[in-house]
Amino acid sequence: MILSGIFFALYVVIVVAIGIISSRKESEEDFMIAERRVGGVQLAATMSAGFFDSAVLSLYVAYLYEFGFSAIWIFVGIILGFLVIRRFAARIKAKADEMKTYSMPEYFFRVLGKKNGLMFTIILAIQFFLFLIVNFIISGKVLSALFPISYIPAVIIGGLIVLTYLLMAGFKAVIRTDFFQLVITFVLTLTVGLFLFGRTHIPSTDLNLFQMGAGNLIGFVILGAMSVMVAPDLWQRLFAKDRVQP
């Protein structure tokens, strides 16, 4: 309990410090889109961290429980989705820079007109509001399990931590905290994997790549690909890239 508290307090201090440092001498363009100067390593890190939030990970754990190792087909779809985005990335980036757009709905508002832009805005607002609720629920569950605090205060604490660095530095803080959180995720995943190696048994049926059946397999590939191609946070990160090679 004490060790968990120390690590959590250190995490809070670091992300808030990132927000404070990022907010120094910050322009409006910096706050909104990190001045469109995000480097390749930073972009890869923030796309990875931003895509695999607690909502996505909790869903994947449920898929693993239901389908075993064959749930990995959703990641095959995600790879295909990134390859499609990569194919058109330079064109999308150039158009976004030309129009000075900050978000995916604004991009389609300028390209496809007012009605399409409004449709994208409404759908994405509902979608991400629901994702936000799921993330708050999971953060509250985790914090209340780790520390002697009830669920509601745990949700509030988790939300306030994110809100603090967002209000201080906006998108630039998101980029930098994503990089930090990706490092944490990698270290913890490696540590847990090494700890469990040889200590747990996986049934051979769960290792079958085709356990879910052809229909579910195709559905998972399509779901993974589409979740990348229509993800507004990934598009915004693409807009923030310093340059994209055609």
Image (tube, grey):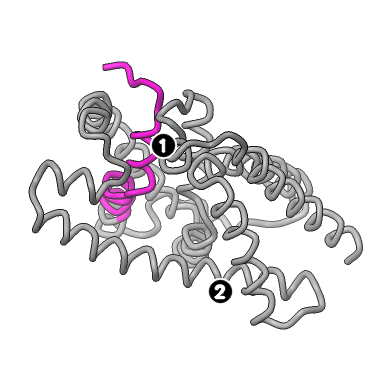
Looking at the magenta stretch, what is its main secondary structure? helix
Residue 115 placement: quadrant: bottom left
Q: Is residue 161 above or below residue 194?
A: below
* Residue 130 placement (x, y as % from top left): 39, 70
Circle 2 residues within 10 Å: few <14, some 14–19, many ≥20: some
Residue that badge 1 annotates: 29
Magenta stretch, residue numbers: 220-246
Q: Is residue 119 visible?
A: yes
Specify whether residue 228 is painted magenta.
yes
The residue drawn where x is 58% and y is 34% is 25
Q: Is 23 positioned to the left or the right of 233 in the image?
A: right
* Residue 92 placement (x, y as % from top left): 23, 31
Quadrant occupied by the N terminus: bottom right
Residue that badge 2 annotates: 137
Q: Is residue 10 above or below residue 129?
A: above
Q: Amino acid at mark 1?
A: Glu
Q: Amino acid at mark 2?
A: Ile
Per the image, label 2 sits on a secondary structure element best described as helix
Q: Is 81 positioned to the left or the right of 199 in the image?
A: left
* Residue 238 placement (x, y as % from top left): 35, 34
Residue closer to the observer: 212 or 192: 192
Residue closer to the observer: 110 or 82: 110
